[in-house]
């Protein structure tokens, strides 16, 4: 009696073997093309092969394959992996460069507004004063008109310090940088009406483009880095912003180490640096939002645009976030 029961149990085990694992990658049924992701893996008792059964058509699919390309399979896989890494590095640099470029355009446009004209007006007034002073002092008028550097000249008692720098530096029309070095930038902005008046607000229209581009790049990285969870995606987005800041350092070095020779460059030296920092900081919002919403948006769009059968090949979008693939959800 006991032997008969053991025989029955053995036959039942053969008829319904216990699953030993599940399929975690994309694998299509050889008969109907259904994606077997999430299906149980069994060991077939007669041939001792690992198999899975398609829930759609009931066909048995073997999980042991033999490569048809031999050694070239690994070679082409290595080439593809190298190209993919190169593409990711290029996109990393491109993403940072795009954020920096639009931020730089915002800064340049913000500094080309009314404050630049105000600086030019102030310089022209100062120049007229120096022309009048030069006219009252013949010994310096001819030299200033001829743009000749004057060293050790005797100026009238009470000559303003700005005029002394002007005359001793020589060049009636080439002394903007000397005049600018004597100015108090904060005082000029305050006299003009503050930062709200000095900054050209039309420049912030560039932020619309910056928002769209940063969000799109965030969605790309959210999908491209499928193995990364939220923390990893945010770290990668932070690296993109950090690289943009590195690009910005070169602009700051140029602004702080070169002289301003005309009103436009003077306005850039004052207005552009804080606007550049503000623009890069603003790009953090759409970029981080994009990397977090990239996969949900992709899943929603694939459900809308693709028929259910084609969703099987994109099930990684669900599995990577711990979600059930579409065919398992629809079967409930």
Image (tube, grey):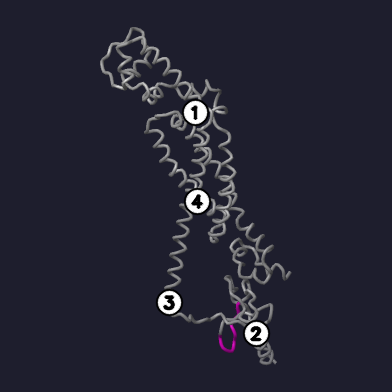
Q: Residue at x 59, y 73 (%)?
A: 23
Percent position of residue 230, x then y: 57, 54
Which label sits in the foreground, 4 or 2? 4
**Mark nearer the viewer, 3 or 1:** 1
Q: Is residue 46 magenta?
A: yes
Residue in the image at 54% along x and 61% along y:
227
In the rendered image, which residue does mark 3 sit on?
72
**Of the numbered discs in the image, which one, if any, rests on residue 13?**
2
Q: Residue furthest left?
A: 152
- Ranked by sequence position, the earlier of labels 3 and 1 is 3
Q: CA distance from mark 4 to mark 2?
A: 57 Å
Marks 3 & 1, CB-CB < 8 Å contact: no
What separation in Å lies between label 3 and label 2 (alpha carbons)?
41 Å
Q: Is residue 15 above or below residue 77?
A: below
The residue under label 1 is 116
Q: Are marks 4 and 1 in contact (CB under 8 Å)?
A: no
Q: Earlier in the sequence, mark 4 or mark 3?
A: 3
Kindly state the secondary structure of the residue where label 4 is placed. Answer: helix
Q: Quadrant of the N terminus?
A: bottom right
Determine which residue is flagged by label 4.
95
> What percent of the width, then of the height, locates residue 281?
53, 41
Between marks 4 and 1, how big is the CA–CA gap? 31 Å
Is residue 284 shown to the viewer in this render?
yes
Q: Quadrant of the C terminus?
A: bottom right
């Amino acid at each position: 009696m006991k032997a008969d029961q053991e025989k029955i149990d053995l036959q039942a085990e053969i008829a319904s073997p216990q699953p030993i694992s599940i399929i975690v990658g994309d694998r299509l049924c050889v008969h109907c093309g259904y994606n077997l992701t999430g299906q149980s893996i069994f060991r077939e008792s007669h041939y001792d092969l690992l198999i899975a059964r398609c829930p759609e058509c009931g066909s048995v699919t073997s999980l042991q394959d033999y490569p048809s390309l031999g050694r070239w399979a690994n070679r082409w896989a290595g080439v593809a992996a190298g190209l993919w890494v190169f593409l990711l590095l290029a996109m990393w640099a491109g993403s940072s460069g795009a954020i920096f470029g639009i931020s730089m355009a915002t800064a340049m446009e913000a500094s080309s507004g009314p404050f630049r004209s105000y600086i030019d007006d102030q310089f022209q007034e100062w120049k007229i004063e120096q022309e009048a002073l030069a006219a009252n002092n013949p010994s310096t008028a001819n030299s200033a008109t001829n743009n000749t550097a004057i060293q050790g000249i005797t100026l009238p008692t009470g000559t303003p310090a700005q005029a002394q720098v002007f005359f001793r530096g020589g060049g009636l029309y080439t002394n903007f940088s000397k005049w600018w070095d004597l100015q108090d930038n904060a005082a000029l902005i305050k006299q003009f009406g503050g930062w709200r008046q000095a900054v050209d607000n039309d420049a912030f229209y560039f932020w619309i483009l910056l928002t769209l581009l940063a969000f799109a790049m965030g969605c790309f990285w959210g999908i491209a880095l499928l193995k990364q969870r939220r923390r990893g995606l945010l770290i990668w987005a932070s690296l993109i912003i950090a690289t943009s800041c590195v690009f910005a350092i070169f602009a700051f070095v140029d602004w702080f180490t070169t002289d301003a020779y005309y009103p436009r460059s003077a306005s850039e030296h004052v207005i552009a640096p804080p606007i550049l920092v503000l623009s890069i900081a603003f790009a953090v919002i759409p970029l981080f939002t994009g990397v977090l919403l990239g996969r949900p948006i992709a899943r929603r769009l694939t459900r809308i645009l693709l028929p259910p059968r084609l969703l099987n090949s994109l099930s990684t979008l669900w599995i990577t976030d711990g979600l059930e693939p579409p065919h398992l959800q629809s079967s409930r």
